[in-house]
Amino acid sequence: MLFMVIERFKGGDPGPVGERFHLRGRLIPEGNSIEFVASWMTSDGAACYQLMQAPSRDALDSWMVNWRDLVDFDVVEVMPSADFWAIRNAK
């Protein structure tokens, strides 16, 4: 499953998140089946949009707990548009 993870940096400050990432990496727990796909930053640096692959929404919790002191999260399940339309048109 694909998830758009919207990260809003507390205080709008990306600095602490960047520092932790450069020191410790993405902090996906070892043995977890979460996979980073891509990310985009807002032009003001206050938020990041990450596309993640995981077996379920719940699987992301073990990763997000490592960042919750610095980030507020919104998670939305997404799929490629072609897949959406193929499923919709098959009904």
Image (cartoon, helix red, strand yellow):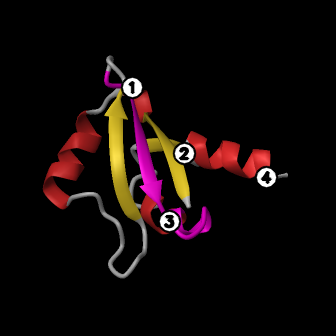
With respect to residue 46, does 27 lie above or below?
A: below
Q: Nearer the viewer, mark 2 or mark 1?
A: 2
Residue 61 horizontal/vertical position (percent): 53, 64
Q: Is residue 12 visible?
A: yes
For label 4, the residue is 90
Contact between labelled residues 2 and 3, with CB atoms less than 8 Å apart: no
Other-residue count near label 3 (Cα within 10 Å), few / some / many at <14 / 14–19 / ≥20? some
The CA distance from mark 3 to mark 4 is: 25 Å
Contact between labelled residues 1 and 2, with CB atoms less than 8 Å apart: no
Q: Nearer the viewer, mark 2 or mark 4?
A: 4
Residue 10 horizontal/vertical position (percent): 43, 34
The CA distance from mark 3 to mark 1 is: 27 Å
- From the viewer's perspective, tell me whether residue 68 is left or right of residue 45: right
For label 2, the residue is 80
Q: Nearer the viewer, mark 3 or mark 2?
A: 2
The magenta stretch spans residue 43? no
Q: Nearer the viewer, mark 3 or mark 4?
A: 4
For label 1, the residue is 12
First-in-chain label (2 vs 1): 1
With respect to residue 8, does 86 lie above or below?
A: below
With respect to residue 56, does 90 lie above or below?
A: above
* Kind of residue at disc 3: Ala
- The residue stretch that appears in magenta: 45-60
* Kind of residue at disc 2: Pro
Q: Nearer the viewer, mark 1 or mark 4?
A: 4
For label 3, the residue is 54
